[in-house]
Image: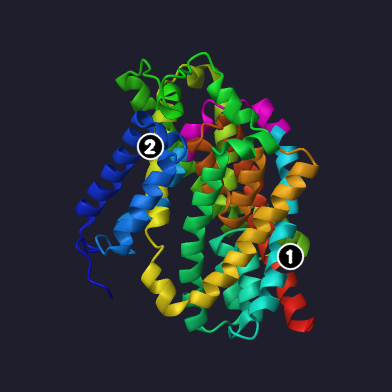
Amino acid sequence: MINTLITADNSLMLWAFIMMTVAAAILSEQHFKWASKIPGSVIALIIAIVASNLHIIPAEAPAYDVVWEYILPLAIPLLLFKTNLQRIIRESGRLLILFLISSIATMTGAIIAFHLFRAYIPELDKISGMISASYTGGGVNFVAMAAKLDTSQGMVVSTIVADNFMMAGYFIILIVLSGWKVARNIWGSPYTDEVENSPAFDKSQTMAAAYWQPKNIALKDIASSLAWSIFIVALSFHLSAWSKALLGQPNNLFQELIFSLITDKYLLLTTVTFIIVSIFKETFSKLNGTQELGTYAIYMFFVVIGIPASVHAILSHAPLLFGFVFVIAMINLMLTFAAGKIFKFSLEENILACNANIGGPTTAAAMAISRGWNNLVGPIMVIGTVGYVIGNYVGTFVYFIVSHGG
């Protein structure tokens, strides 16, 4: 265990670090022109990576778990209260196609990377299955495949280390791409254009400062927004637990597919939010401050994402594994963007499809929020959840190919 300036049990200081980092990121992106090239979400992530690698903060702590388990779920309803449901339905169909193409890109990358590194990394056939499942769905698929394939604990830990570092780097690449003028010209950026061309956008300011103009937010808005959000989270997560207990274990492939869709807590969270917002449309239309509260919570999430990315751990335990996951991620990026160009998907859609594959729906939604693509938050949450459903099948398929194909 590495000694750090702030210990894992010093939750108060860790919360101070998280919130001060968020403040620094928000102030930077709203006051400095260079932050339009390196947005606040990346600034928060980089500060966290640097602090972690300088041993100022620990790589793991209960405070970080609170962000994952409570703050992130709380943010999602807040950011969906103002969404256009008709547009979400329209956009979801397009994104599903690109997401599935990106999943094929992940499988292709895993098979190519396996053949490049097979002579140097033990149990790479199993790791290929685990990573391809994780890079289609998420951590739950990684754990399931690790258990299914009986991968040694040492290789599981090393793979997690490599994956954590790759994730942080991949998010930075995607967010920087979102603001790169060359990429915007090649693929088109209608969602960013919409933000920049809105009546409230002031070109003399940074994009963030222009977007987050002061609003008339009353105390009752904050109280109502948080109350509704925590109620929806509690209801959705209890529905998920209840439905899992009610349905029990699936007996076949079809049942497993249906059960996964019905019981996934984040898909339920999105669905319940849409239902409640549709029923109480007038109530939610009058709420101010939901976007501000939700975005602040998402910035906390970006801080926590960067913390596990340890350079020391990579050099000590997993340099070759980092190369392996790097190849997979870059092939995913290149093939997804190539397909996106052929089939005329926008830059924002390409970025979110890649993010939803490699990082999962929650990180993809966080990225959409951080860039102001609010109309894509709902669709990518819904589509990204499909990855949880198909992830284990993708991992099993890749494992079969690499373990039997040479």
Does residue 343 appear in this view? yes
As measured in the structure, the alpha-carbon distance from the residue carrying label 1 to the one carrying label 2 is 37 Å
Quadrant assignment for the N terminus: bottom left
Q: Is residue 167 above or below residue 220?
A: below
Q: Residue at x 35, y 40 (%)?
A: 25
Q: Position of residue 14 (x, y in %)?
A: 25, 53
Image colouring: rainbow
Is 94 placed left or right of 223 in the picture? right
Magenta stretch? Answer: 76-90
Q: Quadrant of residue 380?
A: top right
Q: Is residue 70 visible?
A: no
Locate residue 297: give its quadrant: top left
Q: Position of residue 71 (x, y in %)?
A: 39, 45
Magenta: main secondary structure equals helix
- Amino acid type, callout 2: Tyr
Task: Report the front residue among 289 and 121.
Answer: 121
Mark 1 residue crowding within 10 angstroms, few (<14) / some (14–19) / many (20+): some
Pick whichever of labels 1 and 2 is earlier in the sequence: 1
Residue 84 sits above or below residue 16 on the image: above
- In percent of the image, x 32 and y 61: which residue is there? 52
Residue where numbered disc 2 is placed: 296
Please state which of residues 307 and 79 is positioned toward the viewer in this rendering.
307
Residue at the disc numbered 1: 108
User: Does 312 appear above or below 98?
Assistant: below
**Image position of 4 with respect to 402: above or below:** above
Residue placed at 36% from the left, 57% from the top? 49
**Does residue 214 show up magenta in the picture?**
no
Q: Position of residue 105 (x, y in %)?
A: 72, 59
Does dot 1 land on a helix, a strand or a loop?
A: helix
Which label sits on residue 401? none
Question: Mark 1: which amino acid?
Answer: Thr
